[in-house]
Image (spheres, rainbow, N blue to C red):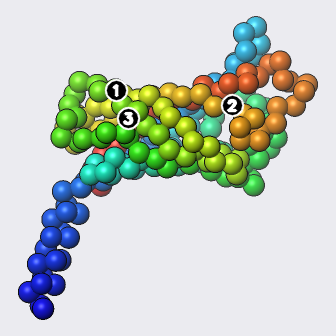
Amino acid sequence: MKKQIVILLLFAGIFSVSAQKYATKTGNLKFEASVDSFEEVAAENKNTSAILDSGTGDFAVLTLLKGFRFKVALMEEHFNENYVESDKFPKASFKGKIEDFDASKLSSTAKTVKISGDLTLHGKTKKITANAKIIKLNDKITVSGNFEVMAADFNIEIPKLVSKKVADKIKVSFSLPLTKM
């Protein structure tokens, strides 16, 4: 019986070592909701966290909404107070999978992948799919890509007064440099 437990623990240790996790706390997440002829509506968060399980392709991203920086301070204030209500809903998260992920096939040549999963923002969750590029250089895996969302899908109301100045479709881009944990 003791031998079986030791063998079981040995195998569990081997499998946990072979499936490396990669993570970052300095990922870059940007969004833009600009409309032609009006002031740019765009922001960037350089402190986005992400984790990738190289054995399964499971992928998760978390960002604090108050971490987004705008060129205009007043826009940042309106974004946090009126749109995403960051005191009530402080974070946005994604939990999903890189489809057909095989860590052994990664190289310094960018490979196109599809990422699908659940995006949670403003208390609402919606399934999304994003096209991304993934590269591996030394012990770093970088995942970058983009997707679009609709503010209405997350019950984010755009006041009528500014509705002509803010796009319905929000373009989101990400660049996540992940290192071994």
Label annotation for residue 150: 2
Classify 10 Å Cα crowding around label 3: few (below 14), some (14-19), many (20 and above): many
Given this view, does label 3 or label 1 mark the residue nearer the observer? 1
Q: Nearer the viewer, residue 43 or 136?
A: 136
Toward the bottom, the furthest residue is: 1
* Left or right of 136 in this view: 125: right
Q: Which of marks 2 and 1 is nearer the N terminus?
A: 1
Number of numbered discs overlaid on the protein picture: 3
Residue at 30%, 46% in the rendered image? 179
* Left or right of 151 in this view: 59: left
Secondary structure found at label 3? strand
Classify 10 Å Cα crowding around label 1: few (below 14), some (14-19), many (20 and above): some
Whole-Å distance between the Cαs marked 3 and 1?
10 Å
Q: Is residue 50 above or below residue 12?
A: above
Q: Which of marks 3 and 1 is nearer the N terminus?
A: 1
Q: Which of 64 and 170 is in front in this view?
A: 170
Residue at 38%, 50% in the rendered image? 58
Q: Identify the amino acid type marked 1.
A: Thr
Q: Which of marks 2 and 3 is nearer the N terminus?
A: 3
Counting from the top left corner in percent of width and height, residue 100 is at 31, 39
Q: Identify residue for label 1.
A: 112
Counting from the top left corner in percent of width and height, residue 37 is at 76, 8
Q: Identify the amino acid type marked 3.
A: Val
Counting from the top left corner in percent of width and height, residue 18 is at 18, 56
Toward the top, the furthest residue is: 37
Whole-Å distance between the Cαs marked 2 and 3?
23 Å
Label annotation for residue 143: 3
Residue at 50%, 27% in the rendered image? 146
Q: Indicate the quadrant where residue 19 lies.
A: bottom left
